[in-house]
Structures are given as C-alpha cells and as structure tokens.
Image (cartoon, grey):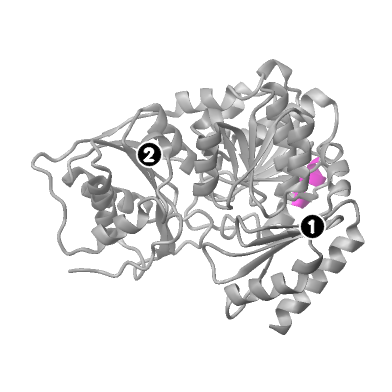
Amino acid sequence: MPLNIESFKAYDIRGQIPNQINVDIAYRIGNATVEFLCAKTMVLGRDMRLTSDEFADAVATGMQEAGADVIDIGLGGTEMVYFGTGELKADGGIMVTASHNPADYNGLKLVRQQAQPISGDTGLLEIRKLAERDKRFKAKTPGSRRSVDINDRYIERLLSFVDLDSLSKLKIVTNAGNGCGGLTLDRLEPRLPFTFVKMQNDPDGTFPHGVPNPMIEATRATTMATIRESHADFGIAWDGDYDRCFFYDENGRFIEGYYIVGLLAQAQLEASPGGAIVYDPRLTWNTIEIAKQYGGRPVQSKSGHSFIKETMRKEDGLYGGEMSAHHYFRDFFYCDSGMIPWLLVAQLVSTRGKRLSQLVDARMEKFPASGEINRKVADAVTAIEKIREEYAADAVRIDETDGISIEFDKWRFNLRSSNTEPVIRLNVESRGDTDLMKGKTREILALLERM
C-alpha cells in the first residue's frame, strides 16, 4: 500500500518506532535509494540501537532486491559509512542511526558516490516519493550481501591527520554516551601515547545513562566532574553516531564549538597554507580573522552539513566547521568526522606546550558569543522580517545567506529558522565587549518574546 512516510527530514530520515519508522519503511527506503541512484554497489552500516540490526537487514533486502550488491561494514559511526563509500568506490551508502535521539527512535542517513550527501535539495524528496509508492523496484538479478572489515583502513586514515611522534602523554577524559564512539576509541588507543579515562564507553542501545547528547546540561555535568576529579588535560564527548565532537578544557569548562572551529582552522592552515576555510553565518568573526591571519581563504556557506559539504567540494575546502560541533576535512572525502578533531586538538596541546584553556581563552575574550539560543515562534518568516526592520537602518552589512545576519561596527547577530525543528535560532557576538553582547542578546530576545 502507498504510505505517507513522515520521518523524512531536511537532511536524513528519523522517527519514532514503529509509527514513524519501522522495518517496512526501512526496506522501502533501501529499495528506493538504489533505484534513484541506479546503484550497483552500496555500503551499509549501523549504530548500537536495539532495532538497528533488524533495520539494517530490511535496508539490505530492499537494496539487494533492487539489484545492488551490499557491502556491510557492520557496527560503527556515520563517518565510517562516509569513509567506506569513498574508499571502496561504492555508488552510495546508508547508515542506520538516529544519532542523539531517544532509544525508541531510529533512522537512516544516505549518501551517493564519493560520500556526497543526499538531502532534501539533492534527491531525498525523490527517494521519499519512490519509497511511498505501492510498487517496489525489483531487478532481474538480485544483488549480494557481504561483510567487509574496513576498520584498519579507517584507523589509518584518522591517524594520517596527526604526527604520532609529536604527541605527548596526555590524560584525556572521553564520554561516548554508550554510543559507537567507544569502539573506535578502543581501536585507536594502542597507537596513541594517551591515558584515557573512559566514560560510558561500551555501546548500549538502552542508553542506561540517558540519551547520547552532549548538548544536554546534565550529560555535560558528569563529564565535567570526571575531568576535574581525574586532573585530565582535557575532555571530549560524542553523540551516538559520533559525527559530532564536543570539548572541555582541563578545568572541566565546556568549550563552545565556535572557538574549536577557529582552533582547527589555524591547525589545518599551518599544515597546508593557502587553503579555503568554510564557515557558516551563525558566528563568523573569529573564524574569518584566523583564516586570513594564517594565509587561508574564508568562504561562507549556508548552515547544515549538506550545504557545507557542497561548498567544501566546490571550493576544494581544506577544512570546514560549524559551531554545532560538526567538523569537515578535505582529506576525509570533504565529510565531517568526530574523531579527527580531538586528535588534532591533542596534537596542538602536545606541540604548543599550552593547556586547552590557554589555546582558546584569548579568542573567547576577543569575540565573546552568546551561544545558540532557540525560541519557538508562531511564524519564523515574519519574526525574522520584523527583527530586520528593527535593526537594518543602522547596520553596516546585511547578509541573507542563511536567515539574516546583521553586522554593526562592534557587534553582529544571525537569526535563522531551524532546518530540523519548529524553532528560530539566535547567535550574537561582539568585538571584545561581553556586556555589549549580553545586552544585545537580551534586547533581541525581548523583541522576539513580544512577537
């Protein structure tokens, strides 16, 4: 029977089991993806959720019946599907994951050849239409399914981003949130000189310590306390499929992703001068200044992984970063990785002889930022337009790459609609004036509240 599959989002498929997503829907999407791509080979991976094995089986069946040979890389992170699709020269890949959502959710992330994302603008809507049909696509000759272990090649690619001889004997707290990040950490550990204090390291789809989402304050608190108690050099945490990497300094302080973007841009430019640094409009001044200072070329992109990756490919971007803790690398098929960032930061701490706090404090003082603030509004388009009317007259620059960015001499802000949630998102920063940043943040929020 035809279906209305509500679990399709802007960048992936994600929903609650069984009403929004189930094995039938997973089968349909696997089948439709192969039909859409005219694929002969597809990589398949899965996370640790309790339904991920059966969902992966359903996806595989759908792909095989459509005529594709399935390369099953097993349990791991989303970036392993990115890597596997590119490394094995497959026609596409599907990762079964719901990232940081609760245990009763699951979903799929889709890529085409060379790990290029499939989003609402690049085929996801067409795949949805095919999946919702009553008719299934059946090839004359079904495809095969075989297991392939890509772990050794994947680990080598991760380690290629750092000079192993330059690394010091650091102590690092890690919190995998009972997602799949711990599996890769365990494989990296024998090759590194670090002492790890591992938290929630074993994959467990019941999420005994809560959902693997480091943006939740309670989740951060346990990581912070462990860093302080263990006197670690710094701490890291991942979401369930570890495509995002979050940082804490040696004092247990959470570091906003914006400042990590600047730090990694500097590190990449020092290793490869002259490259393009891709950033999104939410918070920009720190990244732009660092890119220029270290001989790079700052390039702005719309927010969201599919847009960043498209810009990375178009501009041959060396590195791209979002404040949401997504970090993209040219030598990782222009894709985001949650493992490469912390390896690079560990190398910086090792070679600079400075604490992580010392590496970011000056930038935080120079460009204090509000962090992303979400508000529900009845009409996001109207709200953004009214804020524009309020501030446009005195602005020195207005940019509409994503929502609206309005700049003044000493402060700026970006206001945009979420691509995935019914909210509006605000980011404010200033040039060295924390009180100004906080005051303008309160001012804009008060205007939104009145609307």
The outermost residue toward the left is: 140
Marks 1 and 2 sit apart, C-alpha to C-alpha, by 52 Å
Residue that appears at 82% across and 41% down = 360
Instruction: Classify 427 as above or below 389.
Output: above
Task: Name the one closer to the observer, 40 or 313.
Answer: 313
Q: Which residue is mark 2?
A: 74
Side (left or right) of 259 relative to 134: right
Q: Amino acid at mark 2?
A: Gly
Does the segment drawn in magenta span residue 166?
Answer: no
Does the segment drawn in magenta span residue 225?
Answer: yes
- The quarter in which the N terminus is drawn is bottom left
Q: Is residue 139 visible?
A: yes
Q: Which residue is mark 1?
A: 396
Residue that appears at 79% across and 23% down = 351
Q: Amino acid at mark 1?
A: Val
Which stretch is magenta? 224-230
Residue 243: give x, y in percent of width and height: 54, 44
Q: Secondary structure at mark 2?
A: strand
Circle 2 packing at 10 Å, graded few (<14), some (14-19), many (20+), is many
Task: Name the one closer to the observer, 366 or 200.
Answer: 366
Circle 1 packing at 10 Å, graded few (<14), some (14-19), many (20+), is few
Residue 106: give x, y in percent of width and height: 41, 58
Sequence-earlier tag: 1 or 2: 2
